């Protein structure tokens, strides 16, 4: 399951990745390469192992066996914060923001590490004009400039998801992982978030788990279908849609549910 890359090294590579919980085998030997700048969707029925796979990639769970490589670097033994600092950032199904802080402050906080502040608490961030400018640039990109001074908790659900995407971007990651970015949204909210994702992930690598097939086929360059911990198909959207095994295992029922 190889992907063409600009550099010759995949943005993300999984090599015989496996995860057991006790005697239960959840991820069963996944091999996958995702290229630089690719938008890649992982789809599959509930219980297929999609969230576990994301947790393995981002270091929340250690694999039972196998390897994960980010731009050719082995991620074995690295903590989630170390992987984030290597250029991979993730959003979650449940929105993670600071609801009592302003929209602007949420984005600025996420900029601190990537802008070199580390643990230098003596730096007064309010005086750092470049932080303000970069935070405002991100707010403009995610269409939240007019909400800048509002507490993040009063934003609509779609706006909170947009803010979380902005926070994910602010760390400077070039590999972005989004877990169910449009879950629970109306059609208009979904259209808003899809347009946003398309814009902010330009020239970045996107890996997303998503149940909405309209979103998947509208955004993804390639799709992997995960069923019972195994990838049963990977290919371009039209190839996956036409795959008989995928139709039988998942896609037919999923597309029916959309109508």
Image (spheres, helix red, strand yellow):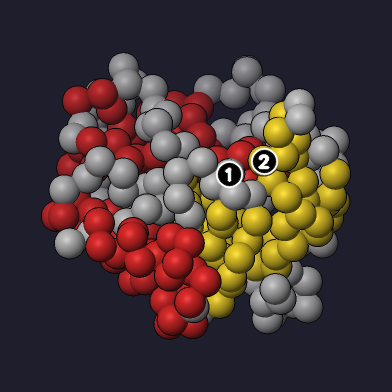
Along the viewing direction, whichever of 249 and 60 lies nearer the viewer: 249
Query: Quadrant of the rendered structure where residue 115 is?
Result: top right
- How many angstroms separate mark 2 from mark 1 (CA)? 6 Å
Q: Do the residues labelled 2 and 1 touch (CB within 8 Å)?
A: yes
Disc 2 on helix, strand or loop? strand
Q: Name the residue under label 1.
A: 49
Left or right: where does residue 228 sit relative to residue 214?
A: right
Identify the residue shown where x is 43% and y is 70%: 247
Residue 117: percent from the left, percent from the top?
64, 31
Query: Residue 51 at what x, y percent from top left?
Result: 55, 41
Q: Can residue 35 be seen in this view?
A: yes
Residue lying at 47% horizontally and 37% vertically, measured from the top left:
92
Upstream in the sequence, badge 2 or badge 1?
Answer: 2
**Residue wearing tag 2:** 26
Which of the 4 quarters of the picture holds residue 4? bottom right
* Residue 230 position within the rendered picture, expressed as x and y whole percent measured from the top left: 65, 56
Instruction: For label 2, count other residues whose C-alpha is less than 10 Å away and answer few (under 14), some (14-19) or many (20+).
Output: many
Q: How crowded is mark 1: few (under 14 residues within 10 Å), some or many (20 or more)?
A: many
* Res. 167 visible in picture: no
């Amino acid at each position: 399951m190889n992907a063409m890359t600009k550099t010759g090294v995949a943005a993300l590579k999984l090599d015989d990745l496996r995860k057991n919980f006790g005697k239960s085998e959840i991820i069963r030997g996944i091999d996958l390469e995702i290229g630089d700048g690719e938008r890649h969707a992982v789809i599959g029925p509930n219980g297929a192992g999609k969230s576990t796979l994301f947790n393995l990639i981002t270091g929340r769970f250690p694999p039972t066996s196998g390897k994960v490589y980010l731009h050719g670097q082995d991620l074995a033994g690295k903590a989630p914060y170390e992987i984030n600092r290597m250029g991979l950032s993730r959003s979650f199904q449940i929105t993670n923001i600071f609801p009592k802080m302003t929209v602007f402050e949420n984005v600025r906080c996420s900029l601190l590490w990537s802008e070199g502040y580390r643990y230098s608490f003596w730096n007064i961030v309010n005086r750092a004009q470049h932080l303000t400018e970069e935070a405002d640039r991100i707010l403009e990109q995610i269409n939240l400039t007019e909400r800048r001074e509002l507490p993040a908790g009063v934003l609509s659900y779609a706006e909170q998801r947009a803010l979380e995407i902005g926070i994910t971007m602010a760390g400077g990651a070039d590999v972005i992982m989004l877990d169910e970015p449009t879950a629970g949204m109306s059609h208009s909210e979904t259209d808003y978030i899809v347009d946003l994702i398309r814009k902010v992930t330009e020239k970045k690598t996107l890996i997303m788990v998503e149940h909405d097939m309209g979103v998947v086929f509208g955004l993804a360059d390639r799709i992997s279908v995960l069923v019972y911990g195994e990838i049963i198909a990977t290919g371009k959207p039209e190839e996956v849609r036409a795959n008989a095994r995928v139709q039988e295992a998942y896609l037919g029922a999923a597309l029916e549910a959309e109508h």
